[in-house]
Amino acid sequence: MQISMTAQKSFGAFTLSAEFTASGDRVGIFGVSGSGKSTLVSMLAGLVEPDSGEIILDGECLFSSTSKINLRPEQRRIGMVFQQHCLFPHLSVSNNLLYGFNRCPPQFRNIDFNMLVDVLQLKGLLDRGVTRLSGGEKQRVALGRAILANPRLLLMDEPLSALDDGLRFQIIPYLKSVSERFGIPYLFISHSLVEMRLMTDTALVFEKGRLVEQTTGEQLARNRIGKSQVGYINLLKLGRPSPASSLYSYPWGNSRLLLSAVSDNEEVLAELSSKDIILFKNHPVAISARNLLKCTVRSIFDSRGTNGIELDCSGNTLISEVADDAINELEIAKGNTVYAAVKASAFRLPGFRPSGKFIS
């Protein structure tokens, strides 16, 4: 997929100037509320007409103010998932899901209905009216309806915002597989750095209606450590845990970590803030934190006044952050050894309470 936009749209005092070229199957649009993200994707989908400019998708002109071209939304074959579910209230869940599928030419029907229903956990809801669904259930149906329409491009405008964390991390792998397995590229809009890292290869950063940066989701998160209240969120793939006294021991690559929360899943994605990783120059004699990892400093980078420390912990990567004084006191330099301490309670398992019960 390649998108080229040089389009402008004004609403009162606000003006969006979308001028960029992006290619790839997994492109993200990142920005805070009011930065112009939703207006941008609405122009691309044909729901909002730009005041001027040009929009080209894979060599086809969708809009041109000079050439008087403005393809209707249905001519663009672009699917869209809104922040709100926008379901048809008079149709059942099954008929909502099949609405776009039934109108899609047979040669484009590559998505398996039953597989999608299983992934989105909708099997028991198919005969139900959408007015009887919870907010999260409605958003899952909206996701399924857009995917089953088999579009050539899928636009997702904050599609996971209505879902609980547990379901959100279950759906993300399937959304990514849509591009890989069925050849449907997507444009993913979010203000979540974690979602940008998991869902995109390229991130376009908008501020006040202007493109200010084109980067990767990972680099975007590292650049904003000093600006974020939660720091950098390390994402750790952990295996099935085993009891360890009052805690739970999880495999993490060649290491094991002790957590206070338990999951019954074969694999879980744990979150750990860079602010919750304490570094030591030497092995401490005694410490209350239950996790102490011997690590090698892989790199040091500046992030808006904060020092990010990339650590190699037996082949696993962690990002910590320290103040300038700590760099000198701990003699932190590339290739040096440090010890990283983490409390068992510092890890967050999305969708799970500290007791280990799933949040439904």
Image: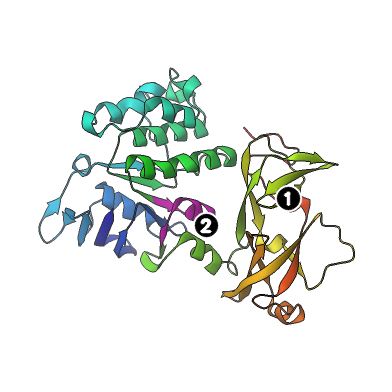
Question: For residue 20: magenta?
Answer: no
Residue 19 screen position, x and y as percent: 29, 65
At mark 1, the secondary structure is: strand
Question: Residue extending furthest top?
Answer: 127
Magenta region: which residues?
188-204
Q: Nearer the viewer, residue 143 or 258?
A: 258
Q: Nearer the viewer, residue 67 or 20?
A: 20
Identified at 60% across, 70% down, the residue is: 226
The mark found on residue 47 in the picture is none
Q: Quadrant of the C terminus?
A: top right
Identified at 62% across, 63% down, the residue is: 231
Give the residue pinned by disc 1. Answer: 256
Residue 343 screen position, x and y as percent: 78, 55
Give the residue pinned by disc 2. Answer: 193
Amino acid at dot 1:
Arg
At mark 2, the secondary structure is: helix
With respect to residue 222, does 244 lie above or below?
Answer: above
Amino acid at dot 2:
Leu
